[in-house]
Image (tube, rainbow, N blue to C red):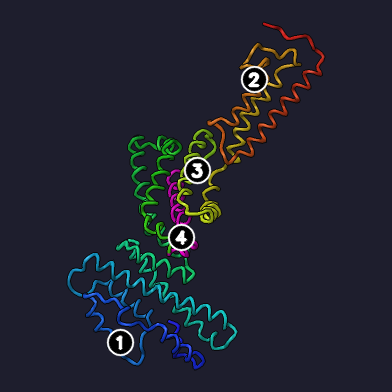
Amino acid sequence: LAATNLGDGDGDGEEDGEEDDDDQILTEDEIEVLPEDEADLESLVPRLASSAAPSALELAAEDAGTSSGGGGGGATTTSAIAAESCARARLLDRVASEVNRLRYYREKGKDLLFIRNLEPRIDAAEDTLASAVRDALSNATTTTRSKDALRHCLSAYCALGRVADAEEILRVERVAPAIKKVVDAQLAAASTSSGGTARARAQASSTSAYASLVDACARAALKACDLELEITRDVDGGDAELASEYDLLANCVLREVDGAVAAAKPAAYSPGAPDAFLANHLAAMAMIESLERQMPNVEALRRFRDSDAMSTFLKRWNLNAYYALRFQSIAGAVEEAASATGPLALAVRGNAGGFATAVAAAHWDGVERCWSEEVFLPLCADKFTKLTCDILNRYDAWLIQGLNGEKTEPPDAS
């Protein structure tokens, strides 16, 4: 691309263009020709023999448009289509590598006048290439499902510095349709079982149906982009560079699952019903753990946890409001027990829960509730730890107040 598009522009770039052309010449042994492509190759001869030879990018884009329009006679086998898709993706990958090198040269020579004059042409060529790569990736994603074609397309996007665009295409064209099927099926089943009433549907949206929905959506998303995940998680093989650039589990899987489930069941995120909120949050975090187990190394796990998709997911859960409700319930019961009695001598109610005083039993019950499965959330561990310390401090203050009280007669044994 650099040689073809820039070599005929200015005299200063002519010598470098000729040198690059020599580097890109292929021998006959390196060119893979399919039998059904021989006619197409014959049609290329006058195009390549003309004085204004088209660039590799122009040929790739033109051929991509021709193939998508239906092509020349006879039924094409699935394997032939996959081979054609892979060949086109391979070509675009090579052109993208040249564009990447061209961008490097442009950055180094950004102060030169002739480089500045060429910038519009360079940008236009890059946009045209990005469009061709998008078509190739869309075809490989939804039609051929060729692993080699996918690898070349993802590599081309990486060379262009447009990884986010590739992830968006995979999310929209592979993950989103799979999740939509799951959501539509579960909502239809819930509507039928609830008799179609709005009140019943609202109640169903905040129950354990959330757990089954989020789990089903995660499994559907992982299955939909299994080949892409296999390519981008190969940290020890030939795709190590792709593994370090792409984060499909965060930007495709988690982003789409989170958005679809939140749109389908918004009431599941309300802390007003703390028991349902707890169950839904634990189910969501179980889904997150299942995705984290897919990570190939610690670096990938760190990028997943620091991603924007994870940040958006966590912001949906108002943990402060949940903790405030639990705090009112636990601390209120403890304070009521401590304030209802007088000095220590009057606080005896037999052997309540293994304790000599009811107040001690109330404080211990508050500590146990902080860490019970019905209340505790791991992401609120710091808050429940502080509440536990506050309860123990309150018990200490109650003891001191009782011991310093005026009534010191021994408690009634009855």
Residue 167 percent across, percent down from the top left: 44, 61
Range of residues picked out in magenta:
238-267
Question: Is residue 101 or residue 267 the one in the foreground?
Answer: 101
Q: Amino acid at mark 3?
A: Met
Q: Amino acid at mark 1?
A: Arg
Taking the image as drawn, is residue 41 in sight?
A: yes
Up-down: is 155 above or below 407? below
Which residue sits at x=25%, y=84%?
43
**Dot 1, how many residues are within 10 Å of its Cα: few (below 14), some (14-19), or many (20+)?**
few
Which residue sits at x=74%, y=16%?
342
Question: How far apart in space, not on screen, are marks 2 and 1 (Cα)?
Answer: 91 Å
Answer with mark 2 or mark 1, whichever residue precedes in sequence. 1
Helix, strand or loop at mark 3: helix
Helix, strand or loop at mark 4: loop
Question: How far apart in space, not on screen, are marks 1 and 4 (Cα)?
Answer: 43 Å
Which labelled disc corresponds to residue 47? 1
